[in-house]
Image: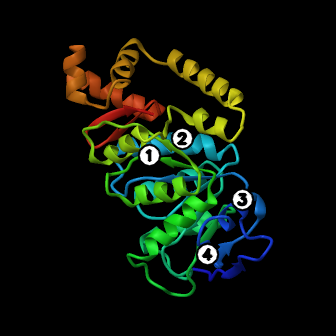
């Protein structure tokens, strides 16, 4: 891999991010890789979630971040596997910009198996940032410092999934102390990684139903995107057969296995399986394990 130049910016520098500069114990120095442009910090949204991201959590992250990033909002996260990785990757794939805040020295890629994502962030006008220089390895004390920067750079924080004792809630704790807006995606209370988001909602976090809830907070128009999405959905529905429409109606409620759909619709499993395969090829539905869900 081609070596990428490391740069440093100090807190007294005019280019130092204004929002971050105002927080308590702001880093005196930021080490970074990538092009440090002031406009990347103008509208930042932190997107955080469980390392044990469920298929539901990944789909919601992809759905929300793809629409938000394409509107010019910079996605900030902590580069760990699970929720962080999904947020960074979706932003890059949507053509948006993302900032990865590392819990280690700027020369270290952690986790190292995400090197491909690391390079994609840099190759798509994103930034890699750390409070730590050199080859310092991550430790228990470095993660809260990273979380503070993630919250400090951002005007708002979106929580997709979180357990009751997760690092995600440490980030939202910083965000609250900094006066940031908290958004949360509701999830099933039977899931351990939805208990933290439920707690945040009880404490006043705003429930997110779709990307427009967040875009409105950033004063970004959602009219065009809503019209485009509505038109696309209507166009897609016209292309569905009667059986495919029935399948879609059942999948709107929850993800289901092929054999359950066959029993619900009183149709042979072979016919259901053929329809599901065709719907996957068309891009109407996806599959996670044995269950199918609407894209």
Residue at 70 percent across and 27 percent down: it is 223
For residue 107, which quarter of the picture? bottom right
Mark 1 and mark 2 in contact? Answer it, CB < 8 Å: yes
Indicate the secondary structure of the residue bearing disc 1.
Answer: loop
The residue singled out by tag 4 in the image is 27
The residue singled out by tag 2 in the image is 64
Which percent across, then down, holds residue 62? 50, 44
The residue singled out by tag 1 in the image is 160
**The label number, if any, that marks residue 61 in the structure image:** none
- The Cα atoms of the two marked residues, 1 and 4, are separated by 27 Å
The answer to which of marks 3 and 1 sits earlier in the sequence is: 3
Mark whose residue sits in front, 4 or 3: 4
Indicate the secondary structure of the residue bearing disc 2.
Answer: helix
Mark 3 and mark 2 in contact? Answer it, CB < 8 Å: no
- The Cα atoms of the two marked residues, 4 and 3, are separated by 18 Å
Q: Can residue 115 be spotted in the picture?
A: no
Task: Compare residues 250 and 139 and report the one nearer the observer.
Answer: 139
């Amino acid at each position: 891999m081609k070596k990428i130049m490391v740069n440093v910016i100090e807190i007294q520098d005019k280019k130092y991010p204004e929002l971050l500069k105002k927080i308590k114990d702001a880093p005196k120095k930021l080490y970074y890789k990538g092009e440090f442009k002031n406009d990347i910090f103008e509208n930042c949204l932190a997107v955080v979630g469980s390392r044990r991201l469920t298929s539901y959590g990944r789909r919601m992250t992809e759905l929300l971040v793809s629409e938000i990033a394409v509107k010019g909002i910079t996605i900030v996260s902590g580069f760990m596997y699970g929720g962080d990785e999904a947020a960074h990757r979706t932003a890059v794939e949507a053509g948006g910009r993302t900032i990865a805040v590392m819990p280690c020295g700027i020369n270290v890629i952690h986790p190292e198996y995400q090197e491909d994502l690391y390079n994609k962030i840099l190759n798509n006008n994103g930034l890699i940032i750390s409070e730590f220089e050199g080859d310092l390895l991550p430790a228990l004390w470095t993660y809260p410092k990273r979380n503070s920067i993630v919250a400090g750079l951002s005007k708002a924080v979106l929580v997709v999934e979180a357990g009751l004792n997760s690092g995600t809630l440490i980030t939202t704790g910083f965000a609250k102390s900094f006066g940031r807006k908290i958004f949360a995606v509701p999830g099933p209370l039977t899931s351990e990684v939805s208990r933290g988001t439920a707690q945040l909602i009880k404490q006043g976090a705003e429930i997110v139903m779709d990307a427009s809830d967040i875009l409105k907070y950033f004063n970004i128009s959602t009219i065009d995107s809503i019209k485009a999405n509505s038109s696309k959905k209507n166009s897609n529905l016209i292309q569905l057969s009667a059986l495919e429409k029935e399948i879609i109606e059942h999948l709107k409620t929850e993800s289901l296995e092929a054999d359950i759909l066959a029993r619900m619709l009183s149709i042979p499993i072979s016919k259901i399986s053929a329809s599901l395969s065709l719907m996957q090829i068309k891009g109407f539905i996806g599959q996670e394990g044995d269950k199918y869900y609407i894209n």
